[in-house]
Image (cartoon, helix red, strand yellow):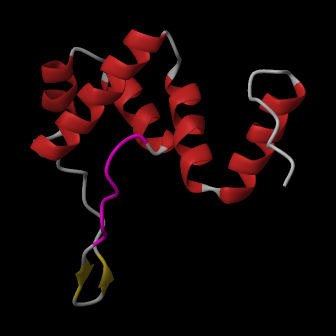
Amino acid sequence: MRITEASRRLGISPRMLRYREALGLLPVVRARRGATGPTVQHRQFGQADLDAVALGLAIEQRYDVSPAALAFGLRVLTDPAARAEVAELGRRTGRIRPLPAM
């Protein structure tokens, strides 16, 4: 389905759906190649896309976070450098206990 229908089903605007896609909160779309090179197509939203957005919306509401904060949380989970720096901040602020000495 096109973005207008997807956004209607999710109860958000097409602009907000594009924003979520830009933040990396939707499954990645693999570009298809045509005979003469990459084919430019409008994204077609499937059930997996709608389910991912709905889960993101539920997490944002449950934990009172923005889409950008959720996207950063995903980055921390997948980027070892970001994870290490956030963990260090947590230790320095007392939110995470220091690692025990060996």
Horizontal and vertical percent for residue 3? Answer: 22, 36
Q: Quadrant of the C terminus?
A: bottom right
Asked if residue 32 lies left or right of residue 62, the reply is left
Compared with residue 35, is residue 5 higher up or lower down, i.e. above or below? above
Q: Main secondary structure of the magenta part?
A: loop
Q: Nearer the viewer, residue 86 or 42?
A: 86
Residue lying furthest front: 102
**Res 45 visible:** no
In reply to whether residue 60 is colored magenta, the answer given is: no
Quarter of the rendering containing residue 37: bottom left
Range drawn in magenta: 25-31
Quarter of the rendering containing residue 7: top left
Asked if residue 4 lies left or right of residue 85, the reply is left
Residue beneath the point at 39% across and 26% down? 15
Horizontal and vertical percent for residue 21? Answer: 41, 41
Asked if residue 77 lies left or right of residue 10, the reply is right
Residue beneath the point at 52% across and 16% down? 65
Horizontal and vertical percent for residue 75? Answer: 58, 46
Compared with residue 21, is residue 55 higher up or lower down, i.e. above or below? above
Residue beneath the point at 33% across and 21% down? 57
**Res 42 visible:** yes
Residue beneath the point at 29% across and 32% down? 53
Q: Quadrant of the N terminus?
A: top left
Total label count? 0
Q: Nearer the viewer, residue 92 or 61?
A: 92
Horizontal and vertical percent for residue 51? Answer: 18, 35
